[in-house]
Amino acid sequence: MAPAHSDASPPTVTSEKLSLTTKLAYGAGDLGTAITTNIAGTFLLFFFTSVAGLDPRLAGSILMISKIWDASIDPVIGILSDRTQSRWGRRLPWMIYAAIPFGISYFLLWLVPPLDKLGLFWYYVAISIAFNTLFTMVNLPYTALTAELTQDYNERTSLNSFRFSFSIGGSIVSLFIAILIFEFFKKSSGQLANNNFNSGTPYLVLGIIYGIIAILSICWCVFGTKRQVLVKESQRLTNQQAQADVSHTIPFLEQIRIAFSNRPFLYVIGIYFCSWLALQITASIIPYFVVHWMKLTQSDFIEVTLWVQGTALPMLFVWGAISKRVGKRAVYFMGMGLWIIAQVGLVMLQPNEVGLMKVLAFVAGCGVSTAYLIPWSMLPDVVDLDELETGQRREGVFYAFMVLLQKMGLAVGLFMLGQTLAWSGFKETVANQPAPIQPDSALLAIRIAIGPIPTVFLLIGLVLAYLYPITKEKHAEILLKIAERRNQDSDR
């Protein structure tokens, strides 16, 4: 039950509509990065254990090391992007210069070089660190563009609807392409039969295709939003002419203290952390659940993922419309309720209940879309509150710390997932050999990871959403006070 005060329909301070071409270009910026992370999140742990032949402990350790590194550089890149000065603004130079190296590093992630297991471990650690570093250089400045493109409360939700439409839509298309590629190599080589999907060639092809898509989509975003970004950058600099912009001189640790003294920010990162961790744990364990518990093929597990994402895509616009009437927090409650029902249902599935599995995937997709939409729509409001309190626009800092904690959580979660599989007796696949039969202990661990664990995180996220204090009325007050202060500064 939500608090008594509503965030439904107070007057807005400003109506600031963005053009369709700007929204499309902004949305395209998440296409390549979403595809690469979706495919990596879905296949990479499975690839390490069932194609490269690594022990689950080593595979989980690779993911943990790379994510911890990735998280550690987020605040640095966030602060540096806040301080960047160029004729293209603060964010766009980071995106355009990192685009091509990002695509190349993704391709290298799917190579299986002729090394022993220890050599493979260090190879994947190095490539994963490079990939995640370049991902942050592209994606963190990109996400900070939301707060820079518009301050309109509802327009930000609309902007994120376009962003995640490209994100989820691209992920859906990427899975269809994956099915076609797996089936092509299955028929042409005869090596991939039934559940035996342990040839590395299809993954290498996926790496090439999606690396190219990532580069092109980033370029579309940069050149398509450039004009609007530069207009807003000019306004930002004009607003700061009446006061010294001290953000460049605030020490790093002081920036951390300021960010974490913002109470609504703590709720937002908690909400995002819990919902995203539940999503990533589920996505990483689904291949094992479908192949080893449901006794289906890898193509079938891709179909299940398509049911989730295919539902989440249109629901973005449904939830966006509902949000305008009842508010962001209420929408989050509705979506999480549906998602929890689906997670509980998954753990109760039996191997012959394939139809019910698809129904649960549909229900989960309705909830998953709110995990994409709502936290990222809340964060720009937090940035506005910070501007009111500090007199500075520090999008990079807040987006950096939000992503940092998300990645730290994912690092620990995926590491523990790998350790749990190993502890339960899971048997890794030897390259080009039939998939082994898993013991009952491993099957139980897979079922626990698909249901109870994600459900716990979703429940914690609901508690944090209940406590989140920035309603639509509150945000309107924040913008009014900011506008008043800017007018006073301009009159001096």
Image: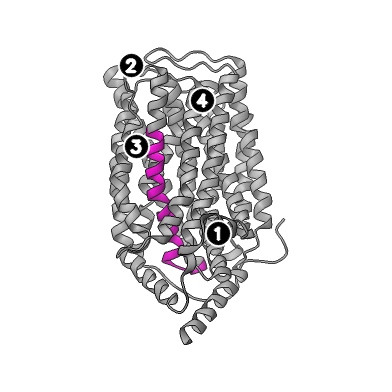
Q: Is residue 408 above or below residue 347?
A: below
Return the residue at label 4: 288
> Residue at the bottom extreme?
491
Q: Earlier in the sequence, mark 1 or mark 4?
A: 4
Three-letter amino acid code at disc 1? Met
Q: Is residue 343 above or below residue 441?
A: below
Horizontal side of residue 8 vs 4, given as left or right: left
Tell me which segment is drawn in magenta. Answer: 127-153
Q: Nearer the viewer, mark 3 or mark 1?
A: 3
Three-letter amino acid code at disc 3? Tyr
Q: Secondary structure at mark 1?
A: helix
Return the residue at label 2: 191
Q: Where the N terminus falls, by quadrant?
A: bottom right
Give the x, y percent position of residue 177. Answer: 33, 36
Q: Earlier in the sequence, mark 3 or mark 4?
A: 3
Q: Residues within 10 Å of mark 2 (few under 14, many from 20)?
A: some
